[in-house]
Image (tube, rainbow, N blue to C red):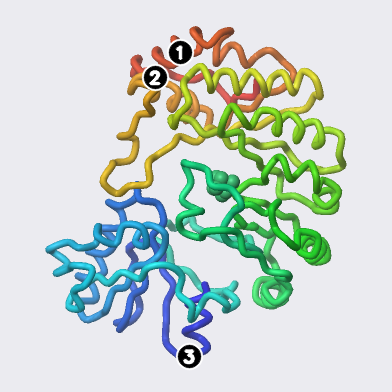
Amino acid sequence: MKYARYCEDMGYEYQYVRGCVDIRYNPDVILMSFTFTFYHRIYEKTIDYYLLKCPNAKIIVGGVFPSIFPEWFDKEKWNGTATNTESFVNVHIGLDVKINDLVPKYNVDIVSEDKLYDRNYLPMYSSRGCINNCAYCVVPKIEGKIKCFKSISKYLEKAKIEMPDAEYISMYDNNFTAQWYIEDIVNELVEYGLPVDFNQGLYAKLFVKNVHLFEKLKYKHLIRFAYDREEDLEDIWKAYKTFTNSNVSADFFLYMLWNFKDSPEDIWNRFMECKKMIDEYGGTIFIYPMKYEPFSPYIKKNEYTGEKWNPKLKLGFQNMVTRNRGFISLSTTDYVYRYIGNSSDEFKSKCLDKGTYKKYKAPEGIMTV
Ligand code: SF4
């Protein structure tokens, strides 16, 4: 969207596309943005598609994946090495300073391979980087230490003109709770009036400190946190207690990392801790288990198995989660035990069943337990 603004400012003809689509003219330059390494096959297919379709265009790839693995693009078929100026595919490493400070073009037309693609929200961020350095995360490697903007008003003002019917704001800060000017930014969001979704999750420890600010906002259904490691336990308990005693009107949502250094026992214990929190404070917790995938284009998606898992256990838990549309929600009932068992051993045996028995079907309906 920032490149769209740049092209508009420069008077260039441009088109914003997602995936492999018919384009309306022959471009001189095609800029592609790639993030997740596990989509490398899709990215390769997309590059090949546009090389064939637009043989005279210069292709430049940027984003997280090319910035960390530029050598992956040194393919013979693309006549490429990172230093070869004749390469068909050129890599841009890091941020592009010429567009970094531009306001995105919120109403840009997007032609997508996915016909159902529709964006009804305003993507925004008020900081880059993070104060933490979690071993499973690429943010510190790509964006470094946190850097914060004091205001996002110029973005909000433009967004109001260009997308007046937007339904909510999606904040993409990696760690919004660590924003140096959190109060200023929250006040701007409150004044704008739309519900907010902190897409990347809030840091439980700092949420407790700033709950009075989060009470001022409207939410797009969820307020998201991460319970990625056993050592997060105390902070999550405090955050849940604070949340249930607050006026924050949203559902409590937890990202839960697995398949990293954890074991099936750890995951089961984390579920049980969430159940204890609900038994103590009431309410519902929506858990979104996120399988760790190493950040490497040399490992296929689903290929990696954490050292304390095995492929069947991993597949079984994955099936359990997928059949429930990605979520496991816990409430005050004891229904949860039907799914994940009454002990970690039972949980493992259920995972093994679901990882072995191909015709396994989860019970009907969305799993709310
Ligand atoms: S807190 Fe979040 S964004 Fe920051 S390093 Fe950890 S996982 Fe990454």
Q: Secondary structure at mark 3?
A: helix
The answer to whether residue 326 shows anywhere in this view is no
Q: Amino acid at mark 2?
A: Leu
* Residue at image mark 3: 10
Q: Which residue is mark 2?
A: 313
* Crowd rating for badge 3 (residues with CA inside 10 Å; few <14, some 14–19, many 20+): few
Label of residue 122 in the image: none
Q: Report which residue position mark 1 lands on.
A: 348
Amino acid under label 1? Lys
In the foreground, 145 or 29 = 145
Q: Position of residue 81 (x, y in %)?
A: 18, 67
At 50% across and 78% down in the image, what residue appears? 99
The residue that appears at 32% across and 80% down in the rendered structure is 29
Quarter of the view holding residue 124: bottom right
Counting other residues with Cα less than 10 Å from the Cα at mark 1, is it few (<14), some (14-19), or many (20 or more)?
Answer: many
| Amino acid type at image mark 3 | Met
Viewed as shown, does residue 147 lie left or right of 138?
A: right
Q: Is residue 95 above or below residue 175?
A: below
User: Is label 1 in a helix, a strand or a loop?
Assistant: helix
Q: Nearer the viewer, residue 283 or 228?
A: 228
Badge 1 vs badge 2, beta-carbon distance below 8 Å: yes
In the rendered structure, which disc, 1 or 3, sits on the residue that comes first in sequence?
Answer: 3
- Compare residues 336 and 172 and report the one nearer the observer: 172
The quarter in which the C terminus is drawn is top right
